[in-house]
Image (spheres, rainbow, N blue to C red):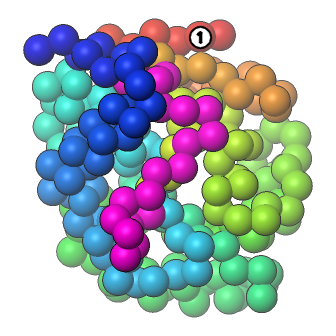
Amino acid sequence: MDPLRFAGRDPDVQRAALEDILRADAIVWRAIELARDLDLPDWMIVSGAIYNSVWNNLTGRPSGYGIKDIDLFYHDASDLSWDAEDVVIQRGAAYFAGLPLPVEIRNQARVHLWYAQRFEGSVPAFRSSAHSLAHFASETHAVGVHLGERGLTVTAPFGLDHIFALRMVPNRNHNNRITHAEKALRAKANWPEITIVD
């Protein structure tokens, strides 16, 4: 089957394909269901667990291949202390203990407090989990999903075509050359079919 069969397709077709792929992935879909039940404020599963699962499906690789962890974002500006975030992280660690991949939980309301210590540049105080996606190093990574009463909600500020085209594209809104290059090298080692845009 053509791994690029959804590239360039209508966004609604791509969203439907994404949901089908995620529902068929036992690891990631279980993480999404558990995140729903954990019910953190403004939560979403983001980035690698999403686009890597698509790449695994399109290239015939098994569930979980190349995924180092599952990123769970939430947004709670009521307490910006590390202690408050750590309480949520510890609660989540016990909650997700049965998954074969670790779940990394981060409060997006706190990111601006530590971002410059880990990455290039700085970011504003994010207004929501979705707001943070627009500041990812790669446009390809900027995707999140939330499972609620109305089903699966997909948030992708740069669309889904980069994912379905097996293409890593830098987010040129930031000086993130080093981070993009590091992530691109790791991705290319796991999925040699992808194209890297410098």
The quadrant of the picture occupied by the N terminus is top left
Q: Mark 1 points at which residue?
A: 197
Above or below for 84 versus 172: below
Q: Which percent across, then down, holds residue 29? A: 25, 59
Asked if the stretch drawn in magenta spans residue 18, the answer is no
Residue positioned 85% across, 50% down in the render: 123
Numbered disc 1: secondary structure = loop
Q: In this view, does 55 lie above or below 150?
A: above
- Residue range highlighted in magenta: 146-166
Q: Is residue 166 left or right of residue 114?
A: left
Relative depth, front residue between 136 and 12: 12
Write the residue at 21% across / 74% down.
Answer: 98
* Residue 68 in view (yes/no): no
Q: x and y percent of residue 51 in the render?
A: 40, 37
133 horizontally vs 161: left or right = right
Residue for point 29% across, 14% down: 4
Q: Say above or below: 148 vs 187.
A: below
